[in-house]
Amino acid sequence: MTLFSKLSQAAAVAAMLTATLATDTAHAQQSYPMTCRGGGTLSIRNDGGNGVRIRFQPGDGAATQGLSPGQCTWSDRALRPGEPTVICDNSASAAKYVSLLVQSNQYAIVQVYNDGQGCMQVTRVGP
């Protein structure tokens, strides 16, 4: 076997492993609970597919400190500057909580992570 073919095989294996690791990392993303109170300036729109985008105002502190209508926040702290104020959900699970968010006396908790592309991506609904 020539040096070129050995390098080609090694490159092919490395490419397959890189793709596999990237996929596993995305699925293994750590999510955290975010609490949202409906109403206020919170806006919900269809993203053109099966998903929704929910724009919210960040709460002043942790969820335990209370939320005004249209606000969302982490269970243990306020959002940091630069953290997205948009929740993105591309799954059927959105139907479980979106109807609550149109009423200012209702709350929803979703598990999310910052996807680095401007969204708090939902991984599941509930605490």
Image (cartoon, rainbow, N blue to C red):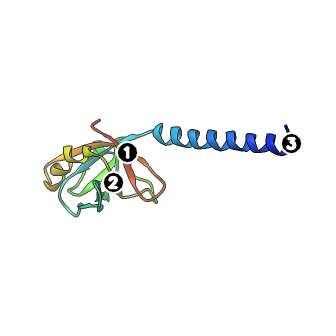
20 lies above or below 59: above
**Residue drawn at point x = 17 percent, y = 58 percent:** 39
**Residue drawn at point x = 36 percent, y = 58 percent:** 85
Residue occupying the far right of the picture? 2
The numbered dot on residue 87 is: 2
| Left or right: residue 73 compared with residue 14 | left
To which residue does mark 1 refer? 112
- Quarter of the image with the C terminus is top left
Mark nearer the viewer, 2 or 3: 3
Residue toward you, 37 or 5? 5
Could you tell me residue 57's position as x and y percent? Answer: 30, 60
Secondary element at tag 3: helix
Query: What amino acid type should be assigned to the residue bearing mark 3?
Result: Leu
Could you tell me residue 91's position as x and y percent? Answer: 30, 46
Query: What amino acid type should be assigned to the residue bearing mark 1?
Result: Val
To which residue does mark 3 refer? 3
CA distance for labels 2 and 1: 8 Å
Mark nearer the viewer, 3 or 1: 3
Q: Give the mark nearer the N terminus: 2 vs 1.
A: 2
| Left or right: residue 51 compared with residue 79 | left
CA distance for labels 2 and 3: 50 Å
Question: Badges 2 and 3: C-beta atoms under 8 Å apart?
Answer: no
Q: Give the mark nearer the N terminus: 2 vs 3.
A: 3
